[in-house]
Image (spheres, grey):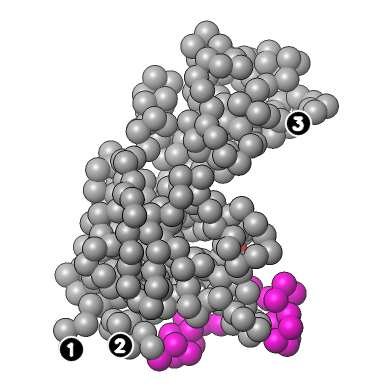
Amino acid sequence: QSLPNVVILATGGTIAGAGASAVNSATYSAAKVPVDKLIAGLPELSKVANVRGEQVFQVASESLTNDNLLTLAKRVSALSKQPDVDGIVITHGTDTLEETAYFLTLTVHTAKPIILVGSMRPGTALSADGALNLFNAVNVAASKDAGGRGVLVTMNDEIQSGRDVSKTVNIKTEAFKSQWGPLGMIVEGRNYWFRAPVKRHTMQSEFDIDSIDALPPVEIALGYEGVAPTAINALAASGIKALVHAGTGNGSVADRIVPVLQKVRADGILVIRSSRVPDGFVIRNAEQPDDKYDWVVAHDMRPQKARILTMVALTKTKDTKELQRIFWEY
Ligand SMILES: NC(=O)CC[C@H](N)C(=O)O
């Protein structure tokens, strides 16, 4: 057979979920159905690619750890080097899918398509979205024109950049959005491309999962009206190497928190100023004098993605100028 070879790495989530009845679209158990059953339930895949599955984990994605991330990325990297693998699909819970997608696009050196996919409803529900999302993922992974675009996400007929995309609604099937728009769409197994990523990824990345064996502890502190320094002080005392501050507005920081973050930086912990606002981006030296305080701004990265990039960057550098360059470039 001359069909492309696609490997599905299954990690759990709602796409492998099962509920008690067809009306249970929100009340169900995630991470129940094994990958071989997912593949067997979608005979249409055999016309698109030679598909085989590997069960890497079977978890809800909010429980994934840094070690899980390393295990998965190393497996993706190893498979991508095999001549008998043309594309890789990763089934994943949607809650932290955006973090895994960004981690892989930063660290896996391949021009072969890598596609993450999940679903918002379990396969047992009325109007389940997982089957079409997975069919689309395998189609994109099997197509020649999907390589070299960074790690991609196929949800709701859209092809999204793994760097840009986030879960923005927690109940609808159109859950994944990027403020910069999707890269394309997939309809009846055909890709329609409209734009390409400009940030560094995969082949052009200076980071390589094959030489990363541990990730440093990096945590997130939220800014809000009435915020106290309690959480930041506790995090700083816990041995973290960097703190992502999810500030208000344009990454603004409460006046009583500013000296706390200055102390955190003086103690050798890197401070990354991000925003809890989903869209837009943080501008350096606006709201706070980042040059003076030696803080880094997270550009357009949401706090959870800023944390991923910070962990990856810290495997190479602790220099704040370097870290800021990395935030602009990735
Ligand atoms: N829609 C989902 O995949 C959410 C299920 C679960 N919380 C997870 O992220 O794995």
Q: Is residue 231 left or right of residue 211?
A: right
The answer to which of marks 2 and 1 sits earlier in the sequence is: 1
Residue ID for mark 2: 47
Label 2 SS: helix
Residue 238 place in picture, x, y as percent: 64, 33
The answer to which of marks 1 and 3 sits earlier in the sequence is: 1
Residue 157 place in picture, x, y as percent: 46, 68
> Which quarter is ligand 1 in?
bottom right
Q: Is mark 3 within 8 Å of ligand 1?
A: no
- Magenta residue check for 314: no
- Tell me the CA gap for discs 1 and 3: 58 Å
Q: Residues within 10 Å of mark 1 (few under 14, many from 20)?
A: few
The residue shown at (76%, 31%) is: 224
Amino acid type at circle 2 is Lys
Residue 264 place in picture, x, y as percent: 61, 20
Which quadrant: the N terminus?
Answer: bottom left
Residue 218 numbered mark, or none: none
* Residue 36 seen: no
Amino acid type at circle 3 is Tyr
Residue 46 place in picture, x, y as percent: 33, 88
Q: Residues within 10 Å of mark 2 (few under 14, many from 20)?
A: few
Residue ID for mark 1: 1
Residue 224 numbered mark, or none: 3
* Residue 194 seen: yes
Amino acid type at circle 1 is Gln
- Tell me the CA gap for discs 2 and 1: 10 Å
